[in-house]
Image: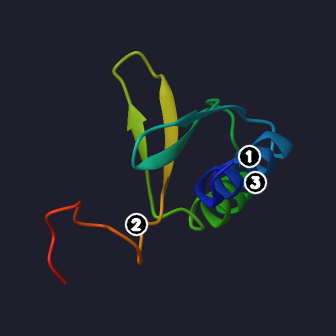
Amino acid sequence: MPSSGVSAAAIAARLSALGLSTRVEEQRQHTSVEAEVPDALSAESWREVLDVVAEADRFGLLATSLNDRTLWAVVRKAAPTTGDVGGPSHQR
């Protein structure tokens, strides 16, 4: 599992420990974590949740008019720093 997957799994585990239902999804350039946020989340729990997602590269909250709230966090996969990054025709 790429390091982004490990970081995202750790974020998901910590959110789950706070009582949130999470899902992790691998994408081409990042690993994402989503969690459904219940209406009755206390202010203290919100602070803990924000501490957790602050470890991600980006995070946010999607709220709908139906009172659904989904917290999301993204951990980017590292770009290659050595090797043939530009392809066979790339000149260094």
Q: Which residue is mark 2?
A: 79
Q: In the image, what residue type sits under mark 2?
A: Ala
Q: Which residue is mark 3?
A: 10
Give the foreground label among 1 and 3: 3
x and y, in percent, of residue 73 in the image = 51, 50
Q: Residue furthest top?
A: 66
Q: Residue furthest bottom?
A: 92
Whether pointer 2 and pointer 1 mark residues with C-beta atoms closer than 8 Å, the reply is no
x and y, in percent, of residue 75 in the image = 51, 56
The quarter of the picture where the C terminus appears is bottom left
**Picture layout, residue 32 above or below residue 69:** below
Q: In the image, what residue type sits under mark 3?
A: Ala
The part of the image, by quadrant, that contains residue 46 is bottom right
Disc nearer the start of the sequence (2/1)? 1
Disc nearer the start of the sequence (1/3)? 3
Q: Give the residue displayed 48% in from the left and 22% down from the top.
A: 68
Query: Secondary structure under badge 3?
Result: helix
Q: Which residue is mark 1?
A: 15
**Picture layout, residue 64 above or below residue 8:** above
x and y, in percent, of residue 55 in the image = 60, 67
